[in-house]
Image (cartoon, rainbow, N blue to C red):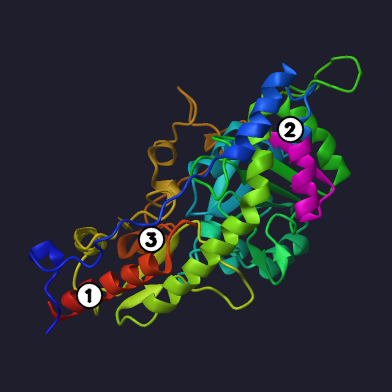
Amino acid sequence: MSEKLALFGGKKTKTTPFGTGRRLGARELAEVTEAIQSDILFYVFGEKVKAMESSMRTMYGMRFCNGCSSGTAAVHIALGALGLAPGREVITSAITDMGTLTGVLYQLLVPRFADIDPRTYNMDPDSVENLINERTGAILVVHHAGLAADMDRLLATAHAHNLPLIEDCAQAHRTTYKGRLCGTMGDISCFSLNHFKHITSGSGGMVMTNREDLEEVVKLFVDKCYFRDGRKRNPYFLAPNYQMTELQGAVAIAQLEKVESIVTARIERGRRLASGLGKIPGITPQEIPEHSTHTFFLYVVRIDPKIIHCSPKEFTDALAAEGIPAEPNKITGGMPVYLYDIFQHQSAFPGSRMPFVLKELGTNASYPKGLCPRAEEAFETTFNFNITEFYTERDIDEMVAATAKVAAYYREK
């Protein structure tokens, strides 16, 4: 007989607060103070953004890094640097954030959505391969939740079809794949410093590449196509203003000093959680391939409806009563992104269906329900655990214990 759930008057599993801590402190304050005392907050004349870029380049062993205003901006910059013609298609994941797609649409490119591997929730290389056609312009890989996508297969596909590959590393700071850091394997990569990421400057992002031809365009795309090296100002293509401020750069310098310890702590706690969850009948935690590190931006857990007779919402309601927060049906994006109204109604630009359907571009895209069935199923059968570097071993063990308790109850129900 299973233990009575707290939801129904039973004893609560977790009665102590989760471990907490400050993400920002003396180092960030010192860097910001220096920036303010310099009386210069514009990246061109200041030193903080440059120092952050140098730190990031060194940490990742890359030739070029440029700070920008957000992770969304970083993806847009990467696409702009590739110079893809309007109407070309970009293959990306059905499970991602809208930030991955914003730049695609602004460049009048057409998203094509790859289905996922149901064990890792990353892009399925076979699905990517099946989407490639004469209109394909690039592959935009999302390293989802802190786990690397299958880069060997995806890189081989990109090379075989002579396609550039962009890495979206917004959720994958210091994530590795076969010993290589995410963000170092493709043609160009994008990072986020959003409030919710492993490290933060409130907002902010970075674009990295080893390709000199892309680096020149990246610098221009960040800054209205303005030359900042003494050459005459004479923009020759349309570019937004995605500058990073010196204040963002200052905070990012201090955060980069902490990223190793933050990620190490998350990995330790995440592995303990994964190990415990993997022993619970009816619960299938996100698979972590042996050759990859998972840096646990979040952790996806699947419920087997044949064994556990409840919805993810019922399950997480019961977890909440046990003192354990979890989010049902809410992998990144909240639903497969192609089910958003912007794709269903083709409403990116008022009064127009572009870039989805436009005679001048030769485009005619649609995104019906069922397009990526494994992605859609994932949203119906999963919930997320969030992990922070401040959680204790006791916190993790109580998360496992509460999950086992709830699972046992709904197995018997």
Q: Is 271 situated left or right of 247 in this image?
A: left
- Callout 2: few (<14), some (14-19), or many (20+) C-alpha neighbours within 10 Å? many
Secondary element at image label 1? helix
Q: Residue at x 46, y 73 (%)?
A: 272
Q: Position of residue 296 (x, y in %)?
A: 51, 61
Q: Which residues are magenta?
A: 51-67
Q: Position of residue 411 (x, y in %)?
A: 19, 79
As drawn, the label of residue 205 is none
Q: Residue at x 74, y 31 (%)?
A: 48
- The residue carrying mark 1 is 405
Question: In the picture, residue 394 is in which quadrant?
Answer: bottom left
* Residue 87 sits above or below residue 312 on the image: above
Amino acid at the residue labelled 1: Lys
Residue 28 at least partly seen: yes
Residue 242 at least partly seen: no
59 drawn magenta: yes
Quarter placement of the N terminus: bottom left
- The residue carrying mark 2 is 49
- Callout 3: few (<14), some (14-19), or many (20+) C-alpha neighbours within 10 Å? many
Q: Nearer the viewer, residue 58 or 131?
A: 58
**CA distance for labels 1 and 2:** 49 Å
Task: Point out the tag, 1 or 2, that comes first from the N-terminus.
Answer: 2
